[in-house]
Image (spheres, rainbow, N blue to C red):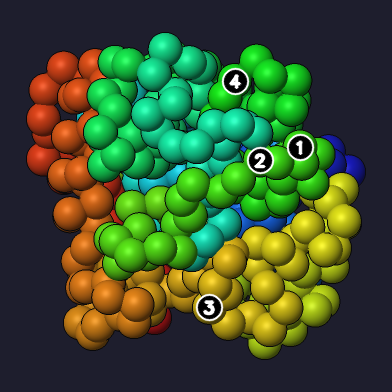
Amino acid sequence: MRLITTLLLSAGLCLATLSAHAADTARVSLFSWPGYGFWFIAKEKNLVPDLDLEISVIEDPYESFSLMTSGGLDVTSSTAEYGPIAADKNVPVKLVTYTNPSYGTDKIILAPGVKGAQDLKGKSVAVLEGGLTQIFMGIWLEQNGVSIKDVKFTNLIMDDAVGALVGGDVQAAEFWEPFGSHALEALPGATVAATSAQGDWIETALLGDGMYMSDAFLNDQPALAEKTMQAYFKAVDYWKAHPAEGNQIIAKALGFPLADVEKVLGKDGKIYKGGIWVFDAQQAGRFMGVVPGELPLGQSNGQMAKHWQTTTDWWLKFGLIEQRHPIEDGVNLAPLKAVLAQ
């Protein structure tokens, strides 16, 4: 009888241990880009010991959003424009924080012989449709007197866009680093028409990245959602203190040359003109309007509200959404507030 009791107790303890482990697992995705690589630092350095990060590299962000909808994924890092689309299409995914503005990593590159936007009328341009690259291209075209209806938008991921530009299938493309440098190196005579380090681009922080969580994760496991975000920002802090080691971890995890990681993140853990500015938790809180205080480079407290309006305007123009939604329909600030409260 004692043996049976002992076995039952042991089995119960094993089940409890397995259940606790499952509860502390967060399934995270990103696509192959150094700006999302802080998740790998969090995992390798075990910055939140009771959290198991299951990290997947998924190149199509819409595949990640689909997995979040079906319950196959909890968190993804992607560009920061998806909130209005999710709200309009009733996708159970929320933006939970903005993570970094682009400060030169994004470029519009023209094929040899293309002098400017006017030369692109009737031509194909490569972007990620439904992403900030499409908005960047659209704004630049209209600023230079060309309607978005006058060009053909070709939906391509970065590797394919490089090949399309070099092969002559498109006459212009929007890239982020290191793919922009790869395109310029592979295509002599190609020129840079605009970068995110110029003028309003960095001041508005329109081009940048965010973190998304599924509604199920946010509603059913709020403590785990907070812990997962905490892991990300601990990794950012670690990288800022140890940029050389952090860049090595990211390069190894992504299979990128270290030089390509440094083209995006820089080498010293500081704001990097030519790449991105990586937000810590306080900076993210200011951008999202959660804590007081201003930001450098012309950005204002609570600027996410303006970002939401701008992306909404453009998704209406591109026909990707049917109506305007309040920011509360696509943003959940609970995890960020909890992290900052600590």
**What is the distance, in whole Å, between disc 3 and disc 1 at their CAs?**
29 Å
Amino acid type shown at disc 1: Leu
- Relative to 217, say whether 211 is above or below: below
Residue drawn at x 17%, y 34% as measured from the top left:
313
Q: Gap between marks 1 and 4, in whole Å?
A: 13 Å
Q: Amino acid at mark 3?
A: Ile
3 and 4 marks in contact (CB < 8 Å): no
Front position in the image: 122 or 14: 122
Left or right: 21 in relation to 123: right
Q: Secondary structure at mark 4?
A: loop
Residue marked by disc 4: 170
Residue 269 vs 222, above or below: the answer is: below
Give the label, 2 or 3, closer to the camera. 2
The residue at which mark 3 appears reads as 271
Taking the image as drawn, is residue 314 in sight? yes
The residue to which callout 1 is attached is 187
Instruction: Return the mark for residue 190.
Output: 2
